[in-house]
Image (cartoon, helix red, strand yellow):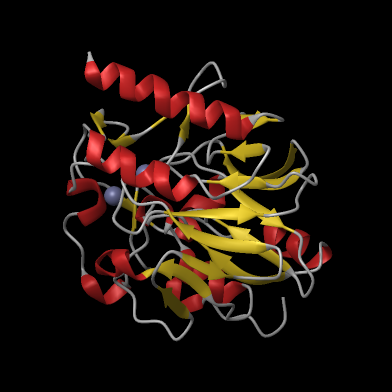
């Protein structure tokens, strides 16, 4: 693609367990994201790769997920999240991010009209956000400022927002949903992909296996639940949002049609469980 230079990222270390890319100059020995109690160091110890190595034996698969275009690495890598491409006037918004960039994916994105901005729910999905921003021509990356400590690259493209809401486009708001991380963010698409709107909560609300409930955890791999105070705070922030569909960061984990009612039932069920 013309005008794109992401060569400075080609030797930057990427953590094999979580997919976070760090600046080349940092000479990382351990990954702070994996050392945190919300992730884990791989059982074989800390391992590193690069986005070029990942791209050599992975593809980025594009797929329609209940009306929204998604991208995911195939075969799965690290945490295995997907990213969403939300069509908006002026170019798509990329919600969440992936640990590698491929030329084929960039061509496909250009064919879909390009990306105007990246926004990410929390540090587990920051992954190769700086390389993606560069590869997409220097688009802004929107992150909640409460998670600024997890960002290791200096970048002119970072845009930290604070408070409860941030208007990204006429139809897309970023909403603060703390609990899993202090800055955990959801993307609220007020009128899409269907008229009732949708919520993309990252790991703030986690669609469980039956796809009729969500759960609320500080750590999913290590199963540290949210306590009653944090739950109440999160519920108060979800309350004003209207949506019929909910899309989690993992393939197939969607609640379509009655998501708001299912989330309300999930808060009630979880609160009952805490009471014992
Ligand atoms: Zn890691
Ligand atoms: Zn997470």
Q: Residue at left 30%, top 51%?
A: 181
Where residue 186 appears, x then y in whole percent? 50, 53
The answer to whether residue 231 is left or right of residue 206 is left
Q: Residue at left 68%, top 37%?
A: 244
The answer to whether residue 210 is left or right of residue 234 is right
In the rendered image, the vertical position of residue 222 relative to residue 70, given as above or below: above
The image quadrant of residue 110 is bottom right
Where residue 28 appears, x then y in whole percent? 20, 63
Where residue 256 appears, x then y in whole percent? 69, 30
In the rendered image, the vertical position of residue 207 relative to residue 70, given as above or below: above
The image quadrant of residue 152 is bottom left
Q: Residue at left 23%, top 18%?
A: 275
Where residue 276 appears, x then y in whole percent? 22, 13
The image quadrant of residue 11 is bottom left
In the rendered image, the vertical position of residue 163 relative to residue 79, given as above or below: below
Which quarter of the rendering shows the N terminus? bottom right
């Amino acid at each position: 693609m013309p005008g794109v230079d992401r060569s400075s990222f080609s030797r930057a270390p990427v953590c094999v367990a979580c997919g976070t890319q760090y600046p080349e100059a940092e000479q990382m020995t351990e990954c702070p994201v994996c050392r945190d109690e919300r992730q884990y160091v791989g059982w074989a110890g800390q391992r590193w790769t690069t986005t070029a190595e990942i791209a050599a034996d992975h593809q980025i698969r594009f797929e329609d997920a209940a009306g929204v275009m998604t991208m995911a690495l195939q075969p799965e890598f690290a945490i295995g999240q997907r990213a969403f491409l939300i069509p908006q006037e002026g170019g798509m918004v990329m919600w969440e991010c992936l640990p590698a960039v491929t030329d084929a994916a960039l061509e496909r994105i250009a064919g879909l009209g390009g990306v105007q901005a990246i926004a990410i729910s929390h540090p587990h999905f920051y992954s190769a956000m700086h390389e993606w921003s560069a590869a997409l021509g220097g688009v802004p990356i929107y992150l909640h400022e409460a998670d600024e400590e997890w960002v290791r690259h200096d970048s002119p493209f970072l845009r930290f927002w604070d408070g409860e809401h941030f208007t990204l486009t006429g139809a897309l708001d970023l909403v603060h949903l703390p609990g899993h991380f202090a800055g955990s963010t959801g993307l609220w698409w007020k009128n899409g992909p269907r008229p009732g709107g949708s919520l993309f909560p990252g790991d703030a609300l986690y669609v469980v296996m039956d796809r009729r409930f969500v759960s609320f955890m500080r750590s999913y791999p290590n199963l540290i639940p949210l306590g009653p105070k944090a739950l109440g705070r999160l519920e108060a922030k979800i309350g004003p949002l209207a949506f019929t569909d909910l899309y989690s960061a993992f393939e197939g984990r969607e609640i379509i049609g009655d998501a708001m009612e299912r989330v309300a039932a999930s808060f009630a069920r979880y609160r009952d469980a805490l009471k014992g």
